[in-house]
Every structure is written in structure tokens, then in C-alpha cells.
Amino acid sequence: MLAETPHAQKLGLALGGSASVTEDQKAGLIEVRVEPKFLMDVSKKLKELGFDHCVSVTAVDYPRENYMDVIWHVSSYSNEELGNKLVSLTVRISRDEPRVGSLVGVWESSLFSERETHEMFGVEFEGHPDLRPLLLPEELLGKWPLRKDFILPKRRSDLFRKGGAQP
Amino acid sequence: MSNITTAPFTYESLSQLTMKEGVLELQVGPAHAGSGHMRILVWVEGDTVVKVDPDIGFVHRGVEKLSEDRLYVKAIPIVERPNLVDTVNANLGYIIALEKLLGLEAPPRAQYIRVITAEISRIISHLYGIAIYGIFMGSSTVFMWALADREPFIDIMEELTGARLTYSHIIPGGVRWDLPKDFGERLEVALKYLEGRVSDYEKIWMNNPVVRARAEGVGILSGAKATELGVVGPNLRASGVKCDVRKCAPYSVYSDFDFDVPTFKEGDSYARLLIRVEEIKQSISILRQALKNIPEGKIIYEDYYKRMTPLMKSIYDEKGRVKFTSLLTSLSPPKGQSFSRVEGGRGEIFFYLISDGTKNPYRFRVVTPSFRNLPYFTHVMPGHKLADVPVIYGSIDYFPPEADRR
Amino acid sequence: MSILYFIPAQWLPLIESGFYALIFPGFVTILLLAFFIIWFERKAAARVQMRYGPLWVSRKTGGLIQLLADMIRFSFQEFIVPEGVDFLPFIFLPGFLLAFAVLPTIFIPIGPDYARIFPSSYTLLLASAFTLVIPIYLIVVGWAADNKFSFIGALREGYLLISYEVPYLLVIASAFLLYRTLDLVKIVNIQAASVPGIILNPVAAIVYLLVVIRSTGRVPYDIVEADSELIFGPYTEYSSLMFGFVMGVPYIELYGYSLLFATLFLGGWIPLTGAGFVGGLIIPGIVTFVKAVLVMCLLVFLRAVYPRYKLDKAIKTGWTWVLYLAFVSLLISAFVSYLI
């Protein structure tokens, strides 16, 4: 499914060798994977190409493999041709020390999303101007609730189903 | 777990933002007539706002985590809840992402029904936005009018789905109910009524000298800055950036329709009011086209229909109503990822799903338009007068539960 | 006259002025009128807004005594005095506000035989002076409540007070110039001899109404109370019955202003006239009263039409257009007074 389509090749050439570009044809998503050290360069190049705003910043936690993917989804308002494309800029970081450079300097629109990702996953965005918690209540701070090892308490209905006796 | 420390979330850490003497810190919310379910920390110097810090999360419920803990279909009502006045578009966005993951496509009639309900939902959402704008500017008349004018559409949706706001009408592979027989006539009556009302709004609200005095030139966000801040939806288009997901990355059957994307170049609060009215007009046109061109056929994916029990099939044939098959309730899409972008009433709703082949989503990401419109607080409000804060807040149609992912 | 037969003659003036101050057009009328006008405001707005408005408290009258029900509810609520307020001003100012809102009505003659009550030839001056006391108390309330929103509300009141009081005084001056007297009874008599003041000097009437909307905080000038910005302005910290008082004060103020408007510009008790307490004060007074109530109804109806105006623009308007119009009204007064 991941393929070196013409779009992806074009983008890959434009971004230079530091990024691997593939296109998930089924999803219609262009994936750019970079090493953390090239992140800033690649993101700047993406912005120069016309990807001018950040739709979402998120992370995906893989506790077994002990890494996290931090993903910036970027798209374009100003360039109509790029407007229907969505590029995901993915960085794979270690779960033990989840640090990655902040891209607020490149895409100002990622400010609140990075704050959210920080409090949900514990990803430290280096250079982010304002990493205060955003959404979570105090008792959940520092527990990184969207990580996979944060298990939700079982729901009442499940409890009853297992116990069986209670109404 | 990790050696990262977070600054403690205390009131002191927030008030450190107070910069100099003579600056008054106002906590607008969470119990305030002009805040909604959030707190806006406003620092005023004299009557001029120098800094605004939106403190959101008061109604955060963790939609993402809840959905990751549940079956795919059970996420439908969850994603609807945040966008309470615009549930169809949130539902549609999630289903499009899920259908991409499953590799199926709903039949054309179902797609048309989706577009019809989505546009009705957009009208409801815009009317709600106008209503909130009205009450924030102190006009109870427009508040009452706009809220009341949602009713014909809510009634129509209630007849179709049985619920007033949370319809859960769109399911993987189609929709749950076919249109009732007199749906077209009823909708036409409601559209005619709304068209008449829109001209009333123009008389009492848009051309009201006080409204113009308060909204024109207030809260200006230029197109370039709007792009940089990544704001979405009508607010973006009011700043002159012509980007509507329905046009620039069409989903469902929106490419079949002929409609304009209205834009204004002023980018002020008044333009953000006008654009909602213009979009209501466009939605009326889309609804008329959809009613005219809606094809006959099934409202559920062919394969799912085949797998129904005979009883379910008979119910479907008689009443046009899809019963939940066991297949729907235990969807396990193949490994992979998908995303969807839909144009909700307030702007682009973004869904990103990762499946690991099990019955629950591995990663469920939703970004709602109000969350992306947060820069209006931090970047647009400073420099204005205190009285402009509710005007700008109302004009961006900000909905705290949506931004919080309630 | 049979009842009055038993009352010593020297008590009569006392009883008459007591009746004037306490019953009509004074305190009791004001309270009843507050019921009516609040009901009217809500009902008229509801009519425009496709609602019923107050309905279920006494269904037959269309919810006329809704305010009574509200007041009973208020009286059973806890009266919260927050820590840090200036206790005495905070507690007593609503009462003062209420009293000073009622006071101007005593100095406004509603009938030609007003001299029986208060023989003064400076009634215009007295009435307008007492209408100007309330804003000062409002500012004190805003400071005493120890709340940032109250404080900002009081500041707003101060700004608006100054920018709209100057036009107000100019209008009073132009009325003086027009009629060449400060005695309201004489003013009405002059109008009876010629035409009502609103025709003699329409500009002054317009400025007067604008200032009334401003001082009583009617929409679009409810800037001081602005609920989406300041919760309830200077009154933010009041609860229970005190809230009921401060909510009612603007309506009572409005009544005083409207009575003054009726005598200054609408010809007061014209076409009726007469002599004696009943024939010369109460019965013509009903005409004045009805005119004042109509003005009040007009002003409260604005709520259904306009949103709130903005502070800086309101101040600017006050110091520019309203002031210019006030000066124009002075010129018109001088010209017209030269003619008549």
C-alpha cells in the first residue's frame, strides 16, 4: 500500500535525501518520515513548498517496541493544488526520553496541538514557548493518559457483565 | 515513567503572566455570562486588552481515549457529542475515515442522504452561531430568533432519525434510515421559511447601525495571518482565504453539486457574521439540488445487505430502516491508517485512525474546528477594548465543548 | 368632602402631600408601575421574539404579577455578603438608590394645582438635580463591592455619566431658555398657550431621550451592566432581595425621567385642567401619568431591537453628536423663545 507514487517521488526529490516519502494510496496520505535531527530542515522545506498550516499534531504510542511516533499533519490553504493533499510528517522517538524539536517556529498553528500532545503523551517539545497543560484536570497531569499503558478503569457495564449477579 | 516534569497547574503560574503594574487580570469564566464552558483570562490595561489566555478543558472528556477503548461503531455517538449542534458532520467525518480503513464505499443514495443531513446540520450550526453572536452583543431578539429558526430543521431531522440533536444516522456502509416519503416537501417548506427569515435578519441584525458600529473593523485577521495560524471554516473564508474542504478536497458526493464558496476580504467580526448567512444560502441551494437529483437505490453497502438475516431484510424493504448486523458491531478493519477531513459547520473536522487489526481503534485522533480557532483569543483579541472580547468570541462561533473534545 | 369634614383643616396639606408622595404619583404608584413596565418589557420583547414571555403566574392577566413571584423567590434566597466588601455602603446603597430614584417624582408637578403640595418656582431644577444623584451612588456601589467587574462597571458609569450629563444639563438649560422659567407648572401653562414642547424644540426632546436611555441603562446603552462583558456591572455581587432592588431601580429612575419628559415636552396635563386637590392635581395627573408611561413603554421596547453599544463609541457619541445636538437645541430654544 505504501508506494513510491509520482507525488511522493516529487516531494521526496524536493525534500532531499533526509526524508523518506511514501504515499498511502488507500488513505490518500503522503507520509514523510524523518530522523529527529533533520526534522527542522524538512519542515522548513515543506513550508517553503506551500504546506502552510498544521492540521493536527499527535503521537502514536508503541509500548512493546518502545518508541513513539510524533506526527504533524500539514496541508495548504494558499496553494490550491496542495489543498487536497495531506502530508504527515512523522518522527520516531524513543519512549524513554520522548524529546523532539518543536515546530511552532515553522507552523504557528501547531502551538495548541503541541501543548495537547505534550500533556497527553508526555512528549517534550523542545523550544515550544508555552508547554502548560491545556485540557487535562490536575489529577491526570503527568500520567500521560493517551499512552497505551494508561489503562482506563473498566466501565460499570463491563464489571456487571463479568460479575453477572448484580442487576 | 518519564523524567519529564510539568510545571504545576496552579493559579500562581498563570498569574505570572501579569506583566506590569496597572494591568488588571480578569477571569472571564467559567461561570460568566460571556464565556461558555471555559475560562478566558483577560489582562486589561485601562479598557484595552493586552493579553488573552484561553483556559480550556473544563468539559474535556477524552473522546480519543474513550474511542480507543471501544468498538468502532461505539465511537459514533462519542464523536457526535462534542459538536452538539453539528453532529452530522462529525459523524460523517468519522465514518469516511472508517470506510477508507475498511475499503468500502456507501451507495449513491446513502451518499446523497448524508449530504442532505450534513447540510441541514450546517444550517442548524450556523443559526446557532448567529444566535450566540446575538446574545453576546446583548440582543436577545436575534438569539431567540435564530434558536427558534433551527426548529423546523430539527423537526425534520427528528422525523428522519428520531433524535433532535444526536442523530447517529450515518453508519459504516450507509445510513440507518431512508428518507420518509414527504421529506422533500417538508424540507422545501422549511427552506422557504428560512429564506424569508434570512431577509428579516438582514433588516434587524446585519443592517442594524449598532451591530455595524460594534462589529465592523473589530477583530480583523488578515488572510496571510489566518493561514499562518491555521484557523478554519467560515472564519478563514471571512479573511479571504478560499478554502472549503467540500471544494478543495471533495468528499462524499460534494463534487456533484454546484455551489459557491463565499469569501470576504475584510476578515473582521462583521464579515464573519455575513459569511454564515451567505453559507446558509449556499446550503439551501445544495439541499435543493440534492432533493432534485437524489438517486434511487440501496442505502446500505451491498455486501452488508447480503449478510442481513431475512427478517432484517424484510424490515429494510418495508421501512427503509437498517438494522445493525453483527458484522457492523464487530468491525475489525485491516491494519493501516486513514484520515478524513470534512467541512463541518464551524470548519474542518479532522479524523485520523490507525487500525492494528483488532476491534478497537489503535489510535483515534480528532481535531475539531473550535480547537483550531483558538488563536483568535491569543492573537486577535489583544489590542481591542474589553467590550470587543465577547464580540470577537461570538463572531468566531467558538463552542467550548467542541474545542475540549467533550 | 364628607370624609374630609372630620379631619382638622391644618392637617389637610400634610395629608395631600403625603398622598402625593406615597400614593399617586409617588411610591405605591411607582411600585405598581414597576410591575407593569417590567411585565410590558418582557411581554413586548417576547412578542417580537416569538415567545410567550411571562405567562404562568396568573394566566388570566398574561403573567402580570410575575415580578411579585420573582420578588417572593428573591426574598427567600440567601443574601450573600462577600468577604472584603465595604460592609455599610454595600448593605445600604441599594436602599439609597431606591430612595433617590423615587425622590425626583415629588418635585415634578402632575397637575396645575401643584402649589398645594410644594410651592416652589424651581421645580425643574430640583427634579433634574435629584435625577443626577443616582450615578454617584452607583459608582460607590461599584467600589464597595470589591469585585473587578463591579469596579469596571463603576468606571464605565463614571465615564458615561460625565459624557452624557453635559448634554443633559444643556437640554435643561435650553428648556429654561425656551420657557424662561424653572417652574414646571408655568412651563406646562406656556405649552398650553402655544404647542407642546416637543414641537417647539424637537432636538432637545431627542437629546433628552438619549440621555434618559443612557442614565437608566436601557438597551442600547446598557453598557454599565453589560452581562456578557461584566456579568451585572456594579451590581454583580448582589444577591436575593437586594438584587431585586437594584434591578428595579433603573425602572423607577426611568419613571422620574419620563414624568419630567411628559411635563417638559409633552404638555403635561394638557388638555385637562382644574383646581383643588382632586380636580387640579389627581385627575389632570392621570393624563401626565399616561403620557409618562407611554414614553417608558417606548424606551423599554428598544430592548427588542438593538444590541448593546460600545463604551468608547458611546463616549465619543456623547462628546460629539449628542453635545452638538444639545448646543443646537440651545440655539433653537433661543430662537423659539424669541418668537413666542
Image: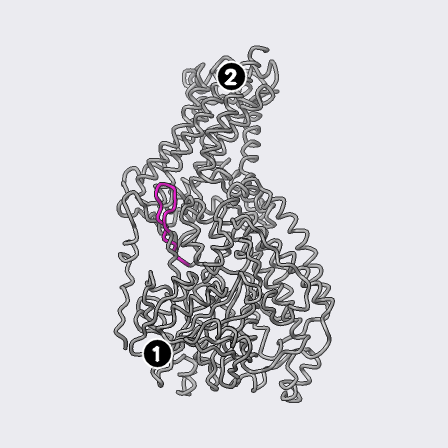
Q: How is the image coloured?
A: one colour
Amino acid type for the residue under numbered disc 1 = Phe
- Crowd class of label 1 (few under 14; some 14 to 19; many from 20; radius 10 Å): few
- Label 1 – label 2 distance at C-alpha: 83 Å
State the residue in front, C201 or C285.
C201
Is A132 left or right of B71, judged from the image as shown?
Answer: left
The residue under label 2 is: C185
Percent from the top left, x then y, of residue B42? 37, 50
Q: Is residue C169 magenta?
A: no
Q: At x 36% / y 37%, what residue is drawn?
A: C155
The residue under label 1 is: A150
- Name which quarter of the figure residue B188 lies in: bottom right
Q: Main secondary structure of the magenta part?
A: strand
Magenta range: B38-51
In terms of secondary structure, where does tag 1 sit?
A: loop
Q: At x 51% / y 60%, what residue is drawn?
A: B232
The image quadrant where one finds the N terminus of chain B is: bottom left
Amino acid type for the residue under numbered disc 2 = Val
Disc 2 sits on a residue from what chain? C
Disc 1 sits on a residue from what chain? A
Q: Is residue A7 above or below residue C172?
A: below
The answer to whether residue A49 is visible is: yes
Percent from the top left, x then y, of residue B112? 67, 71
- Crowd class of label 2 (few under 14; some 14 to 19; many from 20; radius 10 Å): many
Q: Is residue B42 magenta?
A: yes
State the residue in front, C111 or A130.
A130
Q: At x 54% / y 15%, what residue is drawn?
A: C275
The answer to whether residue A153 is visible is: no
Is B27 left or right of B393, judged from the image as shown?
Answer: left
